[in-house]
Image (tube, rainbow, N blue to C red):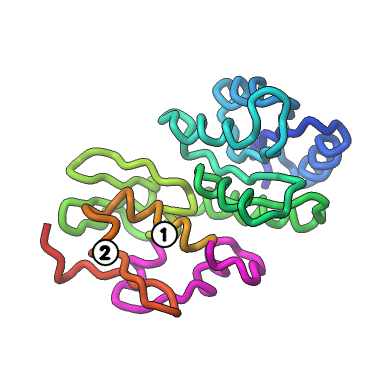
Amino acid sequence: MAEKKILVVDDEEHILELIKFNLEKEGCNVITSNTGDLALKCVKENHPDLILLDLMLPGIDGLEVCRIIRKDPSICEIPIIMITAKGEEIDKILGLELGADDYITKPFSVRELVARVKAILRRTGSKKDSSDFKFDNITINFDKHEVKIDGQRIELTLKEFELLEILIKNEGKVVTREVLLDKIWGYEYVGETRTVDVHIRHLRQKIEKDDKNPKYIQTIRGIGYRFNYEKNEI
């Protein structure tokens, strides 16, 4: 993870120091912030490779910070891992709804947190196969993590893009929720298949003409999802 810049946002000083110490051991350049307002300023000024964002912050909370980042074209693609002391499913799903790529609940294992950070940075730094992939009025560039519809760029989060990429590269095959969790999140995510469903719903809203009756990303009930485009007409 050498040379990677990570912003850690938390209002608990000992948490900031703990995460900073362990990520710097991995060769990262770590920036810290203890408020939502300062976090937004740091993101725009430093454009980090990854943001570790606490949910409960003074002033602007973590969910609002996440929402603002995802609506700003200049910073919307930065991966976000939410950190929260709350373990309720509603908090996790709300974070995903707003565009967080992952979440970890306090108290957390430092080893697990570092592993998740490494997994996301590894994927964002790796090269994808080929250049442009086209179907109907949609063009995807795997190298640039770029999706265009009728020539207009569509903003996807890292996880949304990775889901689309795996489904496309397995076109016509059913990919189970468990496989998607394992391949994209990169660690054991037992019982959290709704995480996939939330991201798939967001992805459909962005690339399907009618996300309630999707043509490209098909649900295989009780199993997972399948990408299909050959018989579609737009």
At 68% from the left and 43% from the top, the residue drawn is 2
Task: Tell me where residue 54 appears, x and y as whole percent.
Answer: 70, 38
- Horizontally, residue 199 falls left or right of residue 23, namely left
Task: Tell me where residue 34 appears, x and y as whole percent.
Answer: 75, 26
* Image quarter of residue 200: bottom left
Cα separation, mark 1 vs mark 2, equals 11 Å
Task: Tell me where residue 68 appears, x and y as whole percent.
Answer: 51, 29
At 44% from the left and 79% from the top, the residue drawn is 223
- Horizontally, residue 75 falls left or right of residue 168, namely right
| Residue at numbered disc 1 | 200
Membership of 71 in magenta stretch: no
What are the residue bounds of the magenta stretch?
165-194
| Residue at numbered disc 2 | 216
Membership of 186 in magenta stretch: yes
* Image quarter of residue 37: top right
Q: Quadrant of the C terminus?
A: bottom left
- Horizontally, residue 158 falls left or right of residue 58, namely left
Name the element at disc 1: helix
At 46% from the left and 62% from the top, the residue drawn is 197
* Amino acid on which the number 2 mark rests in the picture: Tyr
* Amino acid on which the number 1 mark rests in the picture: Ile
Q: Is residue 168 above or below residue 162?
A: below
Labelled pair 1, 2 in contact (Cβ < 8 Å) = no
Task: Tell me where residue 231 appears, x and y as whole percent.
Answer: 14, 71
